[in-house]
Amino acid sequence: MKIVILDAKTLGDDIEFSAIERLGDLTVYKTTSELQLADRIKDAEVIIVNKVKLTSENLPLAPKLKLICVTATGFDNIDVNYCWRKQIGVCNIKGYSTDSVAQLTVAMALSLVTRLGAFDRYVKDGRYTESGVQNRLKPYFHEIKGMTWGIIGFGNIGGEVARIARGLGCSVLVTPHKPQGKYDFFVSLDELLEKSDIISLHVPLTSETRNMINRERIAKMKDGAVLINVSRGAVCDETALTDAVKDGKIGGLGIDVYSKEPLDTESPYNRILNEKNVIFTPHMAWGAYESRVRCIDEVAKNIETFIMGGTRNRVDLQ
């Protein structure tokens, strides 16, 4: 079986693929451009991909294709309807990055609430040395204990963030992405926005979630609330978020995902790159070493199960 990895660079240079190599003839490409795609997939029976888009326009260039494995939970870069019609299997992976994404979410929240960036710069740029004063308490900050943390999306990652938030002494409100059992902390999105001091997003990108955080919903938020997006960039109206930071409506913003990746030179976020209450990271929340090792192991299990006729993590059958 001919297996092709199209964008191995997105998985890191410290990861090896022996678990996949034992399943077939593996070819690994660090990156793949649109011009290179046709030649690289023409004989492939299995394609492993992270960010490369596979659509009804380019998938016909892979006539031998039987399976696509996405090295992520989200699969919005794959035309799943086309694959279903052509009986091409599509597998994602679930749960592999829960701890890694939750860790960054909480790290961002703690840093923004505590205003660590401002204090770090105060020391590094020499102002602390020049001040002659032993300490510095501005900007003023508050304890996270007693705050309300709103979690939008209650899958594996949202659930883990909720557990940690409670451990930090926060009250937790949740708006689940999909209908679930009734819990006393499940509330409407509007109520969550109105009551939360910290809001974190953990939803997939769908027609329902696209631009779910827009101007109207930002207006419902508490003044000075902290917002963190580690899900998908297009879940938020990026211009609206940028304006809310500029206007002081949002007290802290943590962003790991963007509507165009890498960060586009035309992105509205460029207007707030140097703001003291903003943290930008390069879509790395999922990428702790342990998480990436689990990712490759899961992909290998998906391929092995497919070969044996199983349907493990098949999203084209949903």
Image (spheres, grey):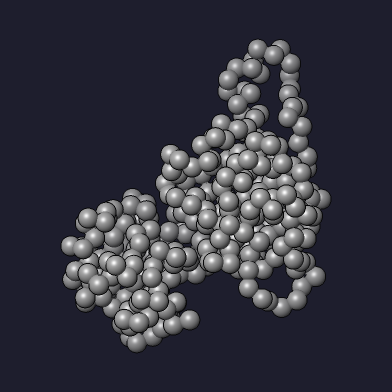
Residue at 27% x, 66% y: name it.
58
Does residue 111 appear to the left or right of 25 in the view shown?
Answer: right
Say above or below: 159 vs 64. above
Say above or below: 121 vs 219. above
Residue at 60% x, 17% y: name it.
126
Does residue 94 appear to the left or right of 217 in the view shown?
Answer: left
Q: Residue furthest bottom?
A: 309
Residue nearest the viewer, comparing 14 with 159: 159
Q: State the image coordinates of residue 283 (x, y, percent, origin top left).
A: 48, 50
Residue 308 sits in quarter: bottom left
Residue 310 sits in quarter: bottom left
Q: State the image coordinates of residue 247 (x, y, percent, origin top left).
A: 69, 37
Say above or below: 68 vs 32. below
Residue 33 sits in quarter: bottom left
Q: Please count the marks in the image.
A: 0
Say above or below: 293 vs 87. above
Q: State the image coordinates of residue 190 (x, y, percent, origin top left).
A: 74, 60
Quarter in which the N terminus is drawn = bottom left
Residue at 60% x, 39% y: name it.
278
Q: State the image coordinates of residue 116 (x, y, percent, origin top left).
A: 65, 35
Does residue 202 appear to the left or right of 283 in the view shown?
Answer: right
Task: Specify whether residue 160 is in view.
Answer: no
Residue at 32% x, 70% y: name it.
56
Q: Residue furthest front?
A: 216
Residue nearest the viewer, comparing 216 with 293: 216
Task: Specify whether residue 185 is in view.
Answer: yes
